[in-house]
Image (cartoon, helix red, strand yellow):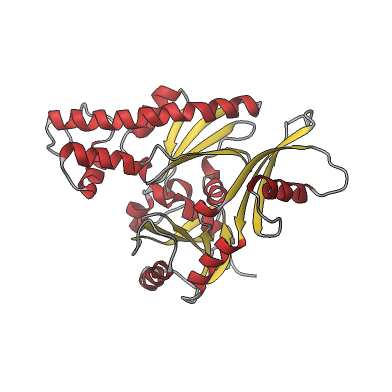
Amino acid sequence: MSRLGSSRTVIGVDVGLRTIKAVQLTPSAGGYRVSALSLLPRPEPEKEVCLADAQALRKVLRRQGFSGRRIVVAAPEERLVRAALELPSKVAGAPIGQIVRMELSRLHNIAPDSFEMAYWEWRTPDGAKPMTRTLAIGCPHDAANSVLDVFEAEGFDVVALDVRSAATGRACEPLLMPAPQITAIADLGWRSTTVLFVCGRSLLYERLMEGISMAELIDKLTEAFGITSEAAQHVANTVGLATDQPVNGIDRETLDAVGKHLRSHFDGLLSELRAPFSYVNHQFPGEGVKRLLLIGGGAAIPRLSSYMHDRLGIEVRPAALSDLVNTPVELLAKAGNPAMTTAVGLARFGGAGG
């Protein structure tokens, strides 16, 4: 038997559109401690996962304190199939998993044996309803194999492909409201925003909002001010949503203009969020959504949490790696990036012994 904290988890690898996030943890009393982490640009951004990604990751792991080659990778989001189902609470004969598989197959017109899947059931606390709400997600074998081949070609031992939403919910466990209260998690990504709703250990519902993205915001700032996208990203992450105080010598006119663009963008997001919030509060009776966690690159915008809190009327806070696991002082700067959050959940997939 190994001593507590003497072994590490697998390495969680989250390949986004523009960056690769990697995290490895060590079990410690009451939770986990960060052992190593890295965020690196993708060699070929906004493309499917390729050999260049695995090669870049391998080189970084050598230098930044990671141990071993066992990894858990996020399954390719663009290839996943999803369904929100209502199934009988009691079914004679066939196991519920078989019914879920057949429904995914029927809805997406794919062979029942052509994908792996995960599903989460939610029942009313008193068990009174005859129907059980089920969220199901499947990954086609060809999509899984393409990712496995890339990393295994570079000598990695891929323990599992995990669904990003499952990994995100697992990572955010320390900040989830206790059931029957519901926690929403908004991933403010580069090309889209995804909102996930969690109650206890069950994923209830998720909604993809492709029209709301950080790329859209950065493009608007780039055009408005005639600056590069890198400079626009820096301005957004520096100025944020409250412009009543001077910021790094930026003049008042510029502050007001930047603030206007940011408020317009996030007002659009808030408007889009109202429909899924209303749906979840109506479909999943209980205490409703009580907290919103922000992750992804957009969650780094200063004062975004307070801005959204004032308009939604619920608690809103970022969920960065440093909010979820114990973090050594020397890694705090990197760990404060909310884009690293999902990689934490991937690292926790395999437990200790990575």
Q: Nearer the viewer, residue 271 or 183?
A: 271
Residue 157: name its quadrant: bottom right
* For residue 273, side relative to residue 333 (left or right): right
Residue drawn at x 19%, y 30% is 257
Residue 204, horizontal then vertical, whole percent = 62, 38
Residue 44, horizontal then vertical, whole percent = 35, 62
Q: Is residue 8 visible?
A: no
Compared with 69, 333 (above or below) is above
Q: Is residue 344 visible?
A: yes
Residue 303: name its quadrant: top left
Residue drawn at x 55%, y 55% is 29
User: In which quadrant is the N terminus drawn?
Assistant: bottom right
User: In which quadrant is the C terminus drawn?
Assistant: bottom right
Q: Nearer the viewer, residue 185 or 30?
A: 185
Residue drawn at x 43%, y 50% is 321
* For residue 50, side relative to residue 121 (left or right): left
* For residue 263, side relative to residue 17 (left or right): left
Residue drawn at x 34%, y 42% is 214
